[in-house]
Image (tube, grey):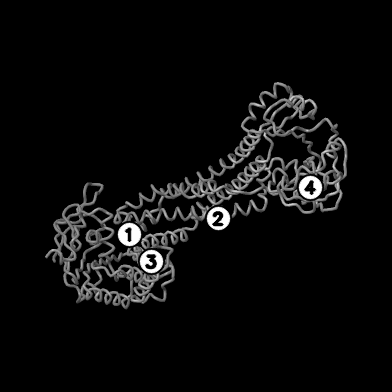
Amino acid sequence: MAATKTLRMRSVGKAFRGPDGPVVVLKNLNLELEPGEVLLVTGPPGSGKSTLLSIGASLLRPTTGEVFVQSHRVSHLPEHRLASIRQQHVGFLFQDFQLVRGVSAVDNVKITLVPLGLMPTEAHRRALAALDAVDMGHRASQVVNYLSGGEQQRVAFARSLVHNPTLVFADEPTASVDQNTGNKMIQLLVEHKSRGATLIIASHDPVMINAPFVDRRLSFETIGLLVGP
Amino acid sequence: MKTLLVHLGAAWFAVRNLRRRYLRTLAISVPLTLAMTIATTAALISDGIRQDGRIAAQHAPDLVIQHVVAGDLVPVHLSHIRTVLKDRVGISDMSPRVWGLVPFPGEGAPGALATIFGVHWSHHAPSDVRGVLVGEWPNQDERGVTVIGSGLAATGHLELGQTIRFHSKGAHSFRIVGILTPNTNVSAASSAWVHPEDARTLFGLSSDEATDVAVSLLDSAESPYLAETVLLKLPEHRLVEKSTVVRHFEAIYGQKSAAFSAIWLMLILVTVSLAFAFGMDTQANERREMALLKVLGWSPLLVVECRLFEAALIGIFATVTGFGLGGLWAVLGAPMISGYFLGWAQVYPGFMPPLAMQWSTGFALAMVGTIPLVAAGVIPAWRIGVLSPDDALRG
């Protein structure tokens, strides 16, 4: 049964080293997500939303507990094994986009496809298609430094979905875009959900909070304290 | 195929990185290209001169007997030498040579000197002096004529049929009947060949005198032994063995080449240090990007590989460009450094330095141009490769 879950967290805790001793951000978190399920994580800044996303995406190891992506126990895998897990299963949309500066939009998206070993023409075609899906096809060759915040957000969106991940983490996906673009982003997430992808979204955008496609909600009221699901 | 495409993808991103960080790329590649250019030119001239020396030495006599008085080369007395060598076994031939330096008569190279060689026309075909002859080789006892080297002809704007006048202890005019383009630039490009008796007149030698005596042996390996025994009978004489000539040639140009190698290696060292410093002093922005690659599914090894590709690409670019520029510099006569290599160009008419490069030299240059730079990148690349993605992204 465990293999059917896209993401599982068991007794996950995370503490960071602080000037006055360890700062506990997550404590004894248990979570299981099915394919196609959408989890919305809300809470004030610094409450641990991003930490949860990072641990789920195997970018950060928990201090305690274990994390599974599909059947892989990612919390205990060596870094080189994690690369192939991320490549196959994980898409991550950062709040601050994290685009590679000085490189065109299409190249930013193609970077995700490098570990897949695609033919250059196929990689280019897929990257363009991903940009088209976020209405950025016409700006594909533009260096990202010269794109607006909203456009950069859309390029980052294309990059996080271009390899069809089964597990998508989105940190404030609609924070930097106007309402129309935000709606488009939500529509894309819904499409991705309908294809069976599991979405974990951190947001305090009211539109997102009230979105009907969200299956479960997890609220960080204060640091390390969870309300729900 | 898939694996190859992954590596090609890493190389593709490395090229993008070099382009967008062009100031750093230039800071590393310019000194390395400069180093490779100097090294290539120096290697081409150095190897060329050595090759010339080896070709010339192949046809050199086993022993040359010279008369030295108070450190000066003075004419040898042939009757005396013949007497000493008469009963020596193992000598296949003994031939007096009349040669010397004279002021270059044309206006093309003021203060320069030309080398006059007396040759028996019938004993030496053009093939003996090895080269391509324009004009004709003189008949057996033809006097008052000369065959000049192409370097001499070019410097002095001399043509077939013209008369040239050389001055030494005597003076003699010669009609130019042939121009020889030798395949050993260093030894013959500034030379003129004349009848031995004309050379004697020019250098004020009697019929019993010569500049030196060339001795050929039945077995070349006997030359040290023969030199030792002959020297006992010929005090104030110097016996120059063929191997000594070659050794000195190699030593002189090896040293000159080594001086350039030192400059070159210093430049390489500076470049490698620069690359290492740049690599170690990775900016937060760059660390963030490398961490991002890992978030996007790049393995730590692929991240390291990408960084090493950057170093390798700079090295290959600098090496290839350095080879090209160095070759061009050499073909243009290597201004500024050829005078150092062709020390005698101060006294001989100038000529193009001979150019050649051994495979081993080229291979060594290519390796030194690329490997140290890549090696210098390993530690900084590894430091970035093992970064925790989350730590780097959070800064």
- Give the secondary structure at mark 3: helix
Q: What residue type is labelled 1?
A: Trp
Q: Disc 3 marks which residue? A: A108
Chain ID of residue with mark 2: B
Q: In this view, does B48 lie to the left or right of B308?
A: right
Gap between marks 3 and 1 measured at Cα: 14 Å
Mark 1 element type = loop
Quadrant housing residue A215:
bottom left
Residue marked by disc 4:
B148
Which one is earlier in the sequence, the residue at label 1 or at label 4? 4
Residue at (80% x, 47% y) in the render? B147
Q: Name which residue type carries label 2.
A: Thr
**3D distance between C-alphas at marks 1 and 2:** 32 Å
Q: Residues within 10 Å of mark 1 (few under 14, many from 20)?
A: many
Q: For the residues tagged 4 and 3, is the chain the same? A: no
Against B15, residue B171 (above or below) is above
Residue under the point 73% across and 41% down: B346
The secondary structure type at the circle numbered 4 is: strand
Query: Could you tell me how many numbered marks the image carries?
Result: 4
Q: In which quarter of the image is the N terminus of chain A?
A: bottom left
Q: Residue B179 carries which label?
A: none
